[in-house]
Amino acid sequence: MVPRPFRVKTVIQETHDTATLDLQPENPEEEFSFSPGQFNMLYVFGIGEVPISISGSSNGSDGFFHTIRDVGKVTHALINLRPGEKVGLRGPFGNPWPIEEGKGKDVVIMAGGIGLAPLRPALYALISRRDQYGDISLLYGSRTKEDLLFHPEFEIWKKKHGIQVKDTIDTGDRSWKGNVGVVTTLVSRVSFDPSNCIAMICGPEIMMKFSVLELVHAGLAEKNIYITMERNMKCAVGFCGHCQFGPAFICKDGPVFRYDRIKPFISTREL
Amino acid sequence: MGHACYRIFLKTVPYIMNKPEVIGKEGLNRLIQILTGMGYQVIGPTVRDEAIVYDSVHSIEDLPAGWTDEQEGGTYRLKKRSDEALFGYTLGPHSWKQFLHPPERRLWQAQKDSLGFDIVPEKLNNIKYAFLGVRSCELHAIAIQDKVFIQSPHTDLHYQSLRQNALFVAVNCGQAGNTCFCVSMQTGPKVEMGYDLVLTEILDDECHTFLISAGSDAGKTILKAVEAKPAGENEVKRAEEIIANTANQMGRTMATENIKELLYENVEHPAWEKIAGRCLSCANCTMVCPTCFCSTVEDVTDITGDHAERWQKWDSCFTMDFSSIHGGAVRNSTQSRYRQWMTHKLASWQDQFDTSGCVGCGRCITWCPVGIDLTREVAVIRESQPDQAGKLSGSGGQNENS
């Protein structure tokens, strides 16, 4: 329950409202490892604490990336931290993406907006053992071209690792030559074998709902689709009760859920 | 010869262990003194602000002698009894969770320094509580909170420390209240688990005694020091009668059969909207509930800006903030918040902790300012099910004899 001291190593400005903090344990002896999909509780002195997914581990250092969008007091304070400044960190918490379950299969990753952040370490894990997976696709939607996250990496994923990367934005201008529309329109434009495929989805609830529909329509079984849920979170260890979603505690039973297991609850309003 | 003795020993020891004894009022007073002498802070029922509340007890003088309570949906009144019973009432607004899982406590402090800030965790509280007058439903409630805070992937060390140090002197209920339904929830009225000592108060004519027996090694040691007398057959029989009589007095009934499926299948039901028409979303039910465990944290900073503290405080799923995420609250309507509370308590709790979250204490009914009665609300949903047509009686709610 007590945060551990971490320091900001670097701050990477990703978009106009989103930055990635590379956080390193203050004490080099401090053990920290995580699985893709897990999150940490980050504390800014005198401001507060919020759950933030781990968006990767940094190459050549013992730091961990946390990609944060400026949506409230604490996230605003976090992305305005400077290198060398201290944060409190509790974690990692939650269960991971089904990296193991996906072995020998095609993988479809669908993300909306900041939802790409917790999926990036999953993508890194797939890439690190690229030969163990079949076709891998990344379908990504964001509001505008200015909001596209990790865009410089898309080319590397495409060209170096043979990943089918498709992106789309809600609103384009004259300078945008790519796709415009919702992310679900991209499903039919990548190849995967629905009978031997798993999908991982992260984004706004409404986006995940329609993505599931589209994937099921394409032939994927509901048990092979994984989504992440977001609820208010205070303790992250199952004590505070805030993150309950039906019988599940998002913090310890999630945030990654197999779709068929939470299907009855996700369609209920205000649950 | 030696062999025969050994056989007698085997036979008689369990008999002695379970044999109830008897103390009078002075014996009960002695028990309080012994516990205090052992370093326990004795907490028991006392009268304050026209209610029975749990507070420090130094002698039997502090106990609510001659008081009883009248309870109904939205109603609680203390009344004088015709006798001097010390435990002649049911439950007040307090439960033991306020000691084991306090309404607020500091988790840590942080001090700004030249390198950023330094966090100092709060020391574990090693206070030893002896809880006097714990009812069976309350022991079940504590066992339920144990599952949340101890028997889960993470352990709340503060709760665990207080819990392990605590001693429980339970009382078999001598009467049931109008909002009681422990029989339905199979949590009482007879104390059967989780106690160190158990009392049954017997008031007959001129005689005011307590049947007492131990439920743990610690209880046995203490009982020895109390110097009780062996109980007679009559006293044991009388105590059983008292408990049986209490069981027959339950003011409410809850039909628990398939209750999980019933509520899961009725997440959309007109009953929720109707309840919301009365529910004030005041959170009283969650505050008085002995199993409700939700909390929030508040980070506070002093005026210098150099010192910050994190406090854990009880929270309630009835507040708007409880479900807020970026973009607004998930549960905006009162009906969704009531549904969350009742469905959690009676249904999803079973999936989470392998037990119901309700012990049938009835506090949420009594302390609801508008008298919403969850036994009745469950019955309304149950009676609306197609397969329930024609068998409307016995589905729960208020009992006719109450």
Image (cartoon, rainbow, N blue to C red):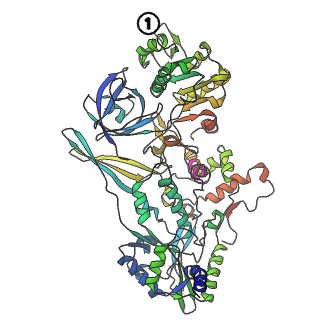
Q: Is mark 1 on a helix, strand or loop?
A: loop
Whether residue B401 sits left or right of residue A95 in the image: it is right
As drawn, A232 above or below B149? above
Quadrant where the C terminus of chain B lies? bottom right
Main SS category, magenta section? helix
**Measured from the top left, where is residue B341 in percent x and y?**
56, 51
Observer able to see residue B64? no
**Measured from the top left, where is residue B29 in percent x and y?**
42, 83
As drawn, A178 above or below B274? above
Q: Mark 1 points at which residue?
A: A175
Q: Write down the quadrant of residue A40 in the picture.
A: top left
As drawn, B217 above or below B353? below
Observer able to see residue B288? yes
**Measured from the top left, where is residue A115 in percent x and y?**
48, 26
Residue segment shown in magenta = B340-347
Whether residue B277 sits left or right of residue B160 in the image: it is right
Whether residue B173 sits left or right of residue B36 in the image: it is right
At a point 45% along the width and 16% down the height, the residue shown is A144
Q: Write down the quadrant of residue B232 in the picture.
A: bottom right
At a point 25% along the width and 44% down the height, the residue shown is B118
Q: What is the count of numbered marks? A: 1
- Looking at the picture, tell me which residue is in the foreground, B348 or B35: B35
Query: Label 1: chain?
Result: A
Give, as a three-letter code, the residue at label 1: Ser
Q: Write down the quadrant of residue B376 in the picture.
A: bottom right
Whether residue A259 is in magenta: the answer is: no
- Looking at the picture, tell me which residue is in the foreground, A235 or A16: A235
- Looking at the picture, tell me which residue is in the foreground, B202 or B167: B167
